Image: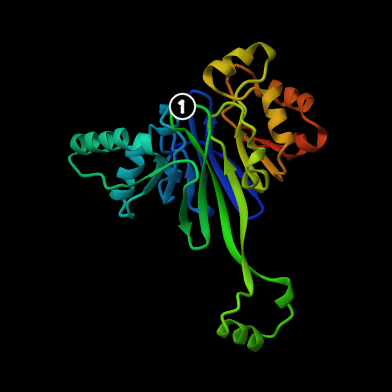
Amino acid sequence: MPSHNLAHIKIDKLEIIGYSVAGEETVVAMPQLGVCFDIGKAPNQVISINHVLLTHGHMDHAAGIAYYLSHRNFSGQSPGTILAPKNLLGPIREIIDAWSRLDGNKVPANLVGVKAGDEYQIKPNLFTRVFPTKHSKGSVGYTVFEKRKKIKPEYANLTGPQIVELKKQGIKIDYPLEIPIVTYLGDTQYIDFSQLKYIVDSKILIAECTFYETEHSERAEAGRHIHINEFAELIEKLQNEHIIITHTTQRTPMREIRRILKEALSPEQYEKVILFMNSRRR
């Protein structure tokens, strides 16, 4: 029986499942890519996903780390890999060690400390790149992208034997190509992410927009979150095909959130938006 009633979105062949309510829990998984952005309280539907990409250490995003790792071990799976800001590795190890003592069994883990600019291989040809955010000390976001090689135009019409011959001569006939699939911002204040091309061009953007009402702008600033006015400015500079909004506040009803979004965004941008916890276009 599922431990959580998760949101479920399908975009082309990719599924996005999870739960994200401000201050309560955030976990966003993409099973086909083998990644889970943050881990929340570790719903059992995400335990089999091999990589957790942790953005920061706040409890609503990170409380399930030990359970995720322990349950994988209990069910005979390989140790889970957790990418996390480097400054969090010490506390995470302490938590895992404490739970190992409480449980009476060692909890195996593959912990990888990351900083802005790092890349990590998820699968063959599939990587994640780390970028800085503005929320808590060391907080980061992640872009998952595919690396391919594309043949140079001048060699596109050559036959197989001709290409083989050129390779034997040491002639480079292709060039590297990066295809950004999804960017996950995590919790963050407004940043002009249009400076990072791989974020601009990501097919899917998963972004927080926590506060919507005018009088909540100070709450957004105090908590280092994004207000709807900043969100509208953020996505206007990007070129994403799909935008998934996470981390919505419970202070504003979902129907009101949809109304405010429709007023704040252009029709073209509004058409791209999916409210994660609503999972319906309006």
Q: Nearer the viewer, residue 258 or 223?
A: 223
Depth check, front residue: 76 or 32: 32
Report crowding for label 1: few under 14, some 14 to 19, many 20 or more residues within 10 A (C-alpha): some
Badge 1 is on which residue? 136
Q: Give how far across and how far down residue 40 sits, in percent.
A: 44, 34
Residue 138: percent from left, percent from top: 44, 32
Q: Quadrant of residue 265?
A: top right
Q: What colour scheme governs how the chains and residues are painted in the rendered image of this protein?
A: rainbow
Tell whether 175 sits left or right of 27. Answer: right
Quarter of the C terminus within the rendering: top right
Query: Which three-letter amino acid code belongs to the residue tagged 1?
Result: Ser
Q: Residue furthest right?
A: 267
Quarter of the N terminus within the rendering: top left
- Residue 95 located left or right of residue 262: left
Q: Position of residue 12 (x, y in %)?
A: 67, 53
82 vs 207: above or below:
below
Q: Residue at horizontal 66%, vertical 24%?
A: 254
Residue 215 in the figure: left or right of residue 104 = right
